[in-house]
């Protein structure tokens, strides 16, 4: 199996990533696919490994693998696929290492005292991935880097909301402790997956804040970069539509995950891509 076949196999044709890449040139599509699969491979360690020592060893392996990749001798198919892109787009090693370190912290940090603490985690993970993707897509205005940072936070917060049930089953609660107290949510009610009225109010608050991060990101995206950055815009619009469905469903996140239909995703993808072109060139 070639590196390209490996990472392509990892991308579900029903995923938001798949749809967000549909209208990109082939080279960019391959690079962004490899970057996102790399992130997924490292991110899943915290869910796949119940033994912390085994998980730590896997994270260490990836840290070493990134070092080897930047020396030109990668072993993993994803890193082999990224080797040329790293040189071509001048991607820096410290971003990859920071991302791994941010995910590694999840093994020991299962609570966040304040939202500021959680935001730092999102910057080290989601924002770093978003910045790498932005560099691959190309930009002219430095304000677009701020867009990438805010978009990464928004996407990471969306992921946290959607994966609420899975994280709780592992004893991990991302919602800040001071906000649980403010909304009168007993931590045990979350661990017992009880959708109380207080929990619903808390989830509504989280959803509102996530939307605000997407809107803040859009403010920083320079007009001249809008079409190049349409991949991120598509992912944002798919995420916003998912948030709306979660809200419409009454935040039943303990019962099931919300999925947009393929037709709905395709419509959002086409509409957003066309809108980005019209906004920049119209």
Image (cartoon, rainbow, N blue to C red):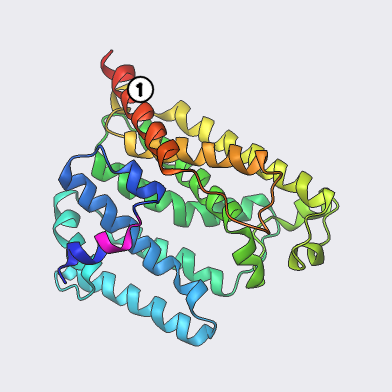
Q: Is residue 68 positioned above or below 132 on the image?
A: below
Q: Which residues are magenta?
A: 8-12
Q: Which residue is mark 1?
A: 275
Q: Is residue 103 positioned above or below 230 on the image?
A: below
Left/right placement of residue 150 relative to residue 132 reads right
Left/right placement of residue 260 relative to residue 182 reads left
Mark 1 Cα-neighbour bin, 10 Å: few <14, some 14–19, many ≥20: some
Quadrant for the C terminus, please: top left
Please say whether residue 61 is visible from this viewpoint. yes
Camera-side residue of 72 and 49: 49
Query: SS at mark 1?
Result: helix
Left/right placement of residue 82 relative to residue 205 reads left
Residue occupying image coordinates x 25% and y 59%: 8
Name of the residue lying farthest toward the top: 282
Q: Position of residue 277 (x, y in %)?
A: 28, 22
Residue occupying image coordinates x 71% and y 59%: 113
Please say whether residue 146 is visible from this viewpoint. no
Q: Position of residue 229 (x, y in %)?
A: 32, 34
**What predominant SS class does the magenta segment belong to?**
helix
Camera-side residue of 55 and 71: 55
Quadrant for the N terminus, please: bottom left
Residue occupying image coordinates x 18% and y 62%: 4
Q: Is residue 159 positioned above or below 20 on the image?
A: below
Residue occupying image coordinates x 79% and y 63%: 187
Determine if the magenta segment contains residue 201: no
Q: Position of residue 139 (x, y in %)?
A: 27, 34
Camera-side residue of 159 and 123: 159
Determine if the magenta segment contains residue 10: yes
Name of the residue lying farthest toward the right: 184
């Amino acid at each position: 199996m070639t590196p390209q076949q490996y990472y392509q196999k990892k991308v579900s044709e029903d995923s938001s990533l798949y749809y967000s890449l549909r209208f990109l040139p082939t080279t960019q599509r391959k690079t962004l696919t490899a970057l996102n699969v790399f992130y997924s491979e490292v991110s899943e360690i915290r869910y796949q490994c119940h033994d912390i020592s085994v998980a730590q060893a896997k994270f260490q392996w990836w840290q070493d693998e990134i070092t080897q990749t930047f020396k030109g001798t990668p072993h993993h198919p994803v890193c082999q696929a990224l080797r040329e892109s790293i040189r071509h787009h001048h991607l820096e090693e410290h971003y990859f290492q920071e991302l791994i370190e941010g995910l590694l912290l999840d093994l020991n940090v299962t609570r966040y005292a304040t939202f500021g603490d959680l935001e730092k985690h999102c910057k080290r993970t989601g924002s770093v991935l978003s910045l790498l993707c932005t560099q691959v897509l190309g930009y002219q205005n430095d304000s677009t880097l701020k867009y990438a940072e805010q978009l990464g936070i928004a996407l990471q917060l969306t992921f946290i909301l959607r994966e609420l049930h899975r994280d709780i089953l592992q004893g991990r609660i991302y919602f800040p402790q001071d906000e649980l107290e403010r909304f009168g949510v007993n931590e045990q009610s979350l661990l017992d997956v009880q959708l109380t009225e207080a929990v619903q109010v808390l989830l509504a608050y989280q959803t509102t804040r996530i939307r605000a991060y997407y809107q803040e990101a859009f403010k920083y995206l320079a007009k001249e970069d809008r079409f190049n950055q349409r991949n991120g815009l598509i992912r944002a619009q798919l995420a916003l539509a998912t948030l709306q469905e979660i809200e419409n469903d009454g935040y039943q996140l303990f019962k099931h995950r919300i999925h947009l239909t393929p037709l709905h995703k395709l419509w959002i993808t086409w509409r957003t891509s066309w809108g980005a072109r019209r906004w920049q060139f119209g």
